[in-house]
Every structure is written in structure tokens, then in C-alpha cells.
Amino acid sequence: MTVIATTLVLTGCGNEETKKKDTEKQTKTVKKQDKKVKIESNEGKPQHEQLITVNKPPEMKYLDDETIDIYKQDEKKYDNTVQAITDDSITLLLGEYCFYDSAMDTMKCSVIVVNGTNTTIEELSFQASIEVKTQPNKTFEEDFTYEFIEVETGVLQPNKGFPAILGFLEKNPLEDDGDKMIKLNSQDITIQLKNIQYNAVE
């Protein structure tokens, strides 16, 4: 009986040690997942040609029909295509939907947001500025932060993107364009990203 009791005690100690090691391992894993990355700006960064794919966001089934149609158009345009993306950063590819809403003094553009880093990322956020060649007299707010979680992005692995619609509020609107939606050519639009932040999952 003494031998059996001793064996049980030793086995229990072993289990506690194993649990301790497992806990330490899990803690290290969490620390890796919490690695926050900040990129000041994409301006002037080099680009390279890359084959990309587009995720259907998990939230898509809850969206309205118009948004779903926009997302599907942009997915069709960019999924499994080679695009110029910014090295080790986030890239925006302009989609088919781009309008100036004169009633709301707002520019809205559909985009594909591409992960050009070498790690899976989550909890992405950034700020953006927009310029329209055909509307040089209009300027737009730049300090709004766009935030995305996994239900919107899916699992954002390297060289994968997801569809989104960005809105830009006009600064000091002066002209009265009436109550209408003005369609714009995406080739006349430039969007620059800044203050990019995300968690790198390793």
C-alpha cells in the first residue's frame, strides 16, 4: 500500500508540473498573438506584384442586398488576380463603387483591403486621405479611424483581402450640388493610408 500511495503522489506532482508547463506555453502564445504593429504611413513605400485572393466576410449574410452586390462585384474584379501591393503593409484596391453624395457631403468608395505582410493579422485599423482629380476644390476629413474585426475581415492571412466601403466627409462644403449621387471614375481617385495598426498573429 505504501508503494501505491507513493506512486500516486508522484503522478499527481507530474500532472501539476505538466499543467504548469502548458499554462506557461499558452501564456507565451497569447503574448505572441498580442504583438501590436504600427505603420506611420504607406507614402513612398515600395510595391511589388502579387497574386491575391479575396475573402467573403463572415458578416456578409447580414448585409443589405446593395452592399452584397457591391462586394460581389469587387470580389469578381480582384479575386485570384495579380496586383501591385505595398511591401509589408496594408494596401487598398479601389472597387467599382465610388460616388459623391451631395446631400450628405460625403464621398463613398468600395475597396478591397489587402494584407501585404508576411503574417496573419487581426483587429486592423487605419486612417485614410482621399483626393479626386476631377474635384480639386473638394477636400475631405482625414482623422477618422476605420476599424475592422474578424467578423468583417475573415481570417486575414498574407496576400488575402476583404471588401469594404469607406466614407469620407467633406470639409467645409461650399457648392450646392443638389440632392444627387455623382458617380466617379476610380482612376481619378487616390487614397493614402496612415496610422495603420493591427495585431500580428504568429
Image (tube, rainbow, N blue to C red):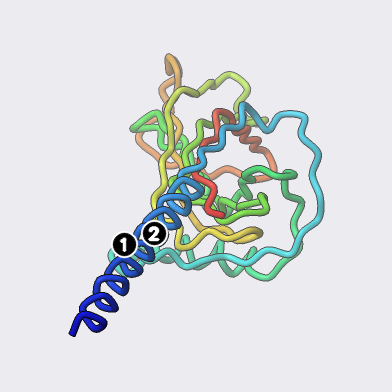
Residue 151 is situated, as x and y percent measured from the top left of the image, at: 36, 59
Quadrant containing the C terminus in the rendered view: bottom right
Residue 55, image x, y percentages: 52, 66
Label 1 secondary element: loop
Rendered image: mark on residue 63: 1
Image point 56% across, 37% down: which residue?
Answer: 37
Q: Could you say which quadrant of the image residue 82 lies in? A: bottom right
Would residue 84 be visible to someone looking at this image? yes
* Towards the viewer: 172 or 121: 121
Q: Is 195 located above or below residue 116 in the figure?
A: above
Using residue 67 as the reference point, say whether residue 49 is left or right of it: right
The quadrant in which the N terminus is found is bottom left
> Is residue 179 toward the left or the right of residue 129 in the image?
left
Question: Residue 147's x, y, as percent?
Answer: 41, 41
User: Residue at position x 41%, y 37% from top?
Assistant: 101
Determine the secondary structure under disc 2: helix
Q: Vertically, is 53 above or below 182?
A: below
Q: Nearer the viewer, residue 31 or 97?
A: 31
Q: Which residue is mark 2?
A: 67
Please give left or right for residue 193 compared with residue 25 in the image.
right
The answer to which of 182 and 164 lies nearer the viewer is 164
Image point (32%, 69%), residue name: 15
Residue type at mark 2?
Answer: Thr
Say if mark 2 contacts mark 1, CB within 8 Å: yes
Question: What amino acid type should be assigned to the residue bearing mark 1?
Answer: Leu
* Mark 2 or mark 1, whichever is nearer to me: 1
Q: Nearer the viewer, residue 8 or 84?
A: 8
Percent position (x, y) of residue 116?
67, 51
